Image: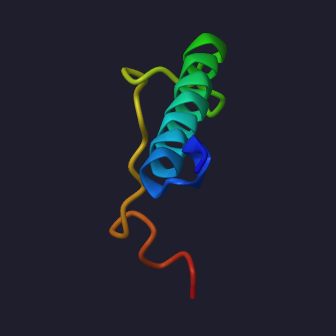
Amino acid sequence: MTALSRPGVRIAAFVAGLGAVFGLAFGIGRGVGPWDTDPTPGHAPTMNHGAAQNEGMHR
């Protein structure tokens, strides 16, 4: 009976493989940085065009 024929060893190898893949992906993601960055800074002024301002415009 080889080691890979035992279910516990297979499960442990699978979990270790998943951990390595996700760890590598996390490391690459941290190195590359976010892809969906908004060029507008968080403190930029925003304009709120509420329904009261446009009440008669879209009829």
Q: Is residue 38 above or below residue 10?
A: above
Residue for point 47% across, 51% down: 11
Q: Is residue 2 above or below residue 22?
A: below
**Residue 58 occupies which quadrant of the picture?**
bottom right
Residue closest to the eye, 30 or 40: 30
In-image side of 43 versus 21 (left or right):
left
In-image side of 4 versus 7 (left or right):
right
Residue for point 42% across, 51% down: 8
In-image side of 44 versus 22 (left or right):
left
Residue 46 position, x and y percent, is 42, 36
Residue 57 position, x and y percent, is 54, 75
Q: Which residue is farthest top?
A: 31
Q: Which residue is farthest left?
A: 52
Residue for point 54% across, 46% down: 14
Residue 6 position, x and y percent, is 50, 53
- Visual colour scheme: rainbow
Residue closest to the eye, 46 or 18: 18
User: The C terminus is located in which quarter?
Assistant: bottom right
